[in-house]
Image (cartoon, rainbow, N blue to C red):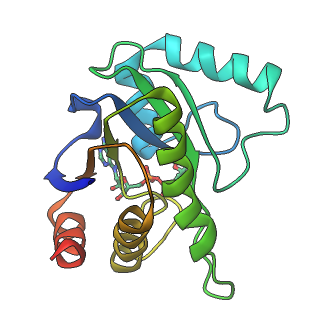
Amino acid sequence: MTTITLVQGDITRQSVDAIVNAANSSLLGGGGVDGAIHRRGGPEILADCRRLRASRYGKGLPTGRAVATTAGELDARWVIHTVGPVYSTTEDRSEPLASCYRESLRVADELGALSVAFPAVSAGIYGWPMDDAARIAVETVRATQTNVQEVRFVLFDERAYEAFARQVG
Ligand code: AR6
């Protein structure tokens, strides 16, 4: 059984086996959660990302996929980088967003991670409406078979926390 927990705060301050990063396909950093993780985690994370680009992901990590690196100086063993879809009003991109959660949990299982912290993937710079992002996140985690015991959603502000709380019930 996977327990879903909610925390309002900064994902880079969490003590868990794996912290999920809302990255972009370049894997070379950015703003939002991505910027915060690389700042606090230090240069080892970027060095690992560069190695992944040089080996497996020369064309970038596709949307909906996930890959792990060291967590550098964060209080975690791994960072799992996933690439959410940019929100669109003309195209339903729910499936690639759900895939981010499924693929991140699959990678967590491969690593043997038992606790995983997620941000609200795609709900910042990528523009996803928070209520819908929260619904997809919670529904997908609930529907995914995983050995992860705790999925912790770490929401930056009260509005995001409340949106997730409505979904968890
Ligand atoms: N801890 C927890 N949540 C946070 C933190 C934090 N430290 N910082 C921001 N959030 P975003 P996206 C929230 O923009 O929409 C980057 O440039 C934020 O308030 O980080 O998937 C990447 O490189 C929002 O609710 O990710 C990509 O180019 C949520 O985390 C692009 O942004 C996600 O916001 C990805 O955009």
Q: Please, is residue 5 above or below residue 123 in the view?
A: above
Which residue is painted at 61% across and 63% down in the image? 85
- Quadrant housing residue 161: bottom left
Q: Please, is residue 2 above or below residue 137 in the view?
A: above
The x and y percentages for residue 72 are 41, 14
- In this view, the residue in front, 36 or 96, is 96
Q: Which quarter of the figure is the N terminus placed in?
A: bottom left
Q: Is residue 155 visible?
A: no
The x and y percentages for residue 15 are 21, 28
Q: Is residue 48 visible?
A: yes
Side (left or right) of 144 relative to 51: left
Q: Which quarter of the figure is the C terminus placed in?
A: bottom left
Side (left or right) of 9 relative to 36: left
Q: Residue furthest bottom?
A: 90
- In this view, the residue in front, 52 or 12, is 52
Which residue is painted at 55% across and 29% down in the image? 68
The x and y percentages for residue 74 are 32, 20
The x and y percentages for residue 158 are 14, 64
Which residue is painted at 17% across and 46% down in the image? 9
